[in-house]
Amino acid sequence: MAQNQEATVVFGVVNETSETESRVALTPDIVTRLKRSAVSCIIESGAGIAAEYTDEDYEKAGAKVADRATVLAEADALGFVDRPSAEIVASLKPGQWVIGMLGSFTDADYITALEQAGLVGIGIEKLPRKLSSAQSMDEMTSQNSVMGYKAAIAAADAYGSFLPMMTTAAGTIRPAKALVLGAGIAGLQAIGTLRRLGAVVTAYDVRPASQGEVESLGAKFLDLGLDFSKGQGEGGYARALTAEEQAQQQAAVDEKAAGFDIIITTAKVPGRKPPVLLTAAGVNGLHRGAVVVDCAASELGGNVEGSAVGEQVTEGGVKLIGAPYLASGVATTASNLLSRNVADILVHFIRDGKLSQDLSEELDNALVVAGRAEAPAEKTE
């Protein structure tokens, strides 16, 4: 970032804390970093408390702490953990920028609403992950890494025995056998954490390149006897399987799953319905006390047939945890990473001291999902 300059862009963040959300889109250290790029910050009072950041922390870093109405009125751009609600969108002025996971893949009506409000929408879900200049902006990578770690911790907490092998005077306890389905960012972090906790870990992913990554962490790669050699999709994600391939995969996973104590599923397709990796038959084949953590559970479905957000116990005694909010459970670290992602996106669009979308780069064209207006007009007293 550049040296300290007089601030000309105001970046705002509101309090998004809820029963399922403890993260904040701005941390005090990022306030300090943004000063060097001519950005001043304004944050709603109490926004960082759930992530262990007080209003005093932000004020010491140089941010202005205010009520929500003031934040929305004064900010040129606003950053979100999720996306602005309809109420917030209605409160914003034409020309203001909103940065967040805006759901542009699946919610065209929402993007249209941003357009009609005259707002500039920056959809982080559209980030070209393979673009080197975008690595520090990649919210999915940072938050999925936290999610994978927390998924392993949640599984260990729910499992009724030790994860590592343990020899005691009363006998030897065998190590837990864990299966991770989906070896992307979240899956690899889950593998590493489970291994550190002492479990015997096996993993599977349709992408051919994932086998080496899994084995490099000391886990076994699950051989389903299937060849999805073109499993790598665009942008670093796994491609969607055909209906026939998915049926073959489900049947093979169901058969293999019965030998595991813990199963963690992490296969998300951004903005779309996640693939079902473990069917109801597979869940029913697990032993009593087995734990399944479905990180992809949402209103669109999950990787596990029958999973829903929250915890449930099947008639067969299997603990099924639908957990899309795991990153929020590590709010301090997750907020540190997320705020860096959002800030770097903001700074990318600051040119000559102002917000600008000349759309001269591949990254610009990908991220701008609503609005083609230039920055808000300079404020007048």
Image (cartoon, grey):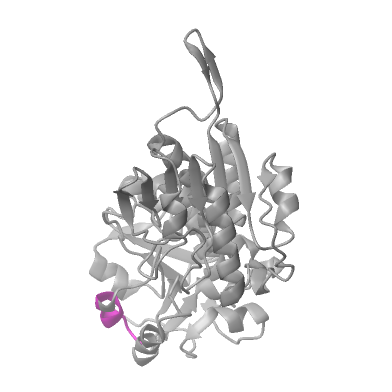
Look at the image and say whether residue 369 sits in the magenta stretch.
no
Q: Nearer the viewer, residue 62 or 86?
A: 86
Would residue 230 be visible to someone looking at this image?
yes
Q: Nearer the viewer, residue 253 or 241?
A: 253
Look at the image and say whether residue 91 sits in the magenta stretch.
yes
Which quarter shows the C terminus? bottom left
Residue numbers of the magenta segment: 87-94
Q: Position of residue 60 (x, y in %)?
A: 39, 47
Q: Position of residue 346 (x, y in %)?
A: 52, 70
> Looking at the image, which residue is at 40% across and 57% down?
324
| In the depicted structure, whether residue 49 falls above or below residue 233 | above
What type of secondary structure mainly makes up the magenta span?
helix
* Side (left or right) of 172 relative to 73: right
Q: Nearer the viewer, residue 52 or 181?
A: 181
| In the depicted structure, whether residue 236 falls above or below residue 365 | above
Q: Position of residue 149 (x, y in %)?
A: 51, 44
Would residue 240 be visible to someone looking at this image?
no
* Side (left or right) of 167 relative to 24: right
